[in-house]
Image (spheres, rainbow, N blue to C red):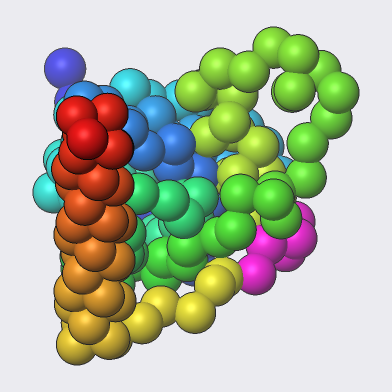
């Protein structure tokens, strides 16, 4: 049986990602039409391979919510030629129904739809040096808070004993 390959050149696939530590949900849109939702391992390579296999020749535009995962996903996707933005979670339009029934596929679909409609604007992506500097400052603040906590514990211990 002959397999027919569709060529998606001159078309744009919009991908909304809901990223988590153990898995990612990706919703795909093409020409104002929802295509599908995929659940996959947390890997840029797996996502890119899926897109290349199922939608060859297309331009890919991707968005995900900024959060604790940082910017490495965006950097790796950009390195593979996928236009990717990181968005502020508060900027993603949501209905009351989305708030009441919150699921990962629904979140991914909302991001993809907003991206396709042009409603999303990316946040500033800091350089690697700036990101590592910020991380260092955060760690210093955490250590300082721990030190103050320990000093207060010792002072409390001595107040009780004296």
Q: Bounds of the magenta span?
A: 117-121
Give coordinates of residue 126: x percent, y percent.
36, 82
Q: Residue at x 77, y 45 (%)?
A: 93
25 or 37: which is nearer to us?
25
Residue located 76% across and 14% down the image: 100
Q: Quadrant of residue 140?
A: bottom left
Name the one closer to the observer, 162 or 4: 162
52 lies left or right of 117: left
Return the x and y of residue 150 as percentages of the image width and height: 19, 46
Q: Looking at the picture, does residue 41 appear above or below residue 141?
A: above
Seen as rendered, the residue at the extreme right is 96
- State which quarter of the image contains the C terminus: top left
Q: Residue at x 61, y 49 (%)?
A: 89
Figure check: 62 above or below 84? above
Quadrant of the image occupied by residue 133 = bottom left
Task: Name the residue nearer the viewer: 1 or 113.
Answer: 113
Residue 32, image x, y percentages = 71, 45
- For residue 120: magenta? yes
> Is residue 158 among what the camera can see?
yes
């Amino acid at each position: 049986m002959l397999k027919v390959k569709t060529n998606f050149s001159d078309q744009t696939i919009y991908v909304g990602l809901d990223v988590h530590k153990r898995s990612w949900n990706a919703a795909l849109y093409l020409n104002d039409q929802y295509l599908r939702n995929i659940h996959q391992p947390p890997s840029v390579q797996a996502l890119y391979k899926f897109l290349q296999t199922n939608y060859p020749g297309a331009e890919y535009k991707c968005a995900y919510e900024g959060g604790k995962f940082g910017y490495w996903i965006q950097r790796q996707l950009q390195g593979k030629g996928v236009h990717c933005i990181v968005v502020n979670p508060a900027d993603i339009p949501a209905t009351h129904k989305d708030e009441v029934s919150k699921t990962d596929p629904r979140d991914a679909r909302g991001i993809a739809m907003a991206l396709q409609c042009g409603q999303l604007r990316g946040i500033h992506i800091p350089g690697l040096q700036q990101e590592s500097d910020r991380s260092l400052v955060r760690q210093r603040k955490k250590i300082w808070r721990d030190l103050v906590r320990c000093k207060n514990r010792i002072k409390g211990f001595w107040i009780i004993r004296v």
